[in-house]
Image (tube, grey):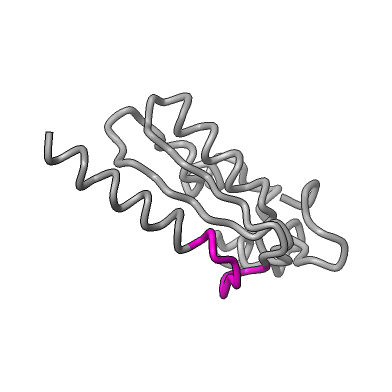
Amino acid sequence: MDAHRLAGGLVHDASDSPESLLMGAPIQSIPERVATANPITYASSDDPTFLSIHGRMDPLVPAHQSEILHQALKKAGVHSKLYLVKDGRHGGFKDDLVLQREREFMESFRTTSAK
C-alpha cells in the first residue's frame, strides 16, 4: 500500500500500522497470514455485485486499493463498479455524482429483478 500512498499519508509498512496491529505482527513478516485478510484472496464468481466509491486524495487508504479490488472482482466475473471521487478524501464526499452513482447502482437491481 505504501507504494501508492499520498505524500504525508498513513504509513502501512510500519510495525505499529493498523494492519500490523490487526495481524499481531509486522505485515512484511507474515505474508501468508496477510493474504488471509486480503479480500482479493476470496474474489469469486458467486460474489455479489459491488459498488466501490473511493476518494482519490484519501490519506489513509490509497485509492489504488479499490482499483485492485475492482480489477480482481471483474477478473472473477463479478459485476463491479468503481467511482473515484476526484478531490475526495476518506469519506464524507462532497461530490454530487456519488449520490447519482449510488442511485444508479440501486436502480440496476430494480430493473434487473423486474425482468
Q: Quadrant of residue 44?
A: top left
Of the pair 100 and 12, the residue shown nearer to us: 100
Name the spot of residue 37 as percent of width and height, x first.
Answer: 48, 49
Q: Residue at x 57, y 63 (%)?
A: 24
Residue extending farthest right: 7
Q: Is residue 1 above or below residue 74?
A: below
Q: Is residue 55 left or right of residue 14?
A: left
Q: Quadrant of residue 43?
A: top left
Q: Residue at x 53, y 41 (%)?
A: 69
Of the pair 71 and 3, the residue shown nearer to us: 71
Residue extending farthest left: 114
Q: Is residue 113 above or below residue 23?
A: above
Of the pair 74 and 37, the residue shown nearer to us: 74
Count of marks overlaid on the render: 0
Magenta span has 90?
A: yes
Q: Is residue 48 left or right of residue 69?
A: left
Magenta span has 30?
A: no
Q: Quadrant of residue 22?
A: bottom right
Q: Is residue 1 left or right of residue 85?
A: right
Name the spot of residue 108 as percent of width and height, x first.
Answer: 29, 44
Q: Residue at x 71, y 69 (%)?
A: 16
Residue span colored magenta: 89-98
Name the spot of residue 115 as percent of width and height, x first.
Answer: 12, 33
**Of helix, strand and loop, which mostly describes the magenta segment?**
loop
Q: Residue at x 53, y 59 (%)?
A: 97
Q: Is residue 71 above or below residue 110?
A: above
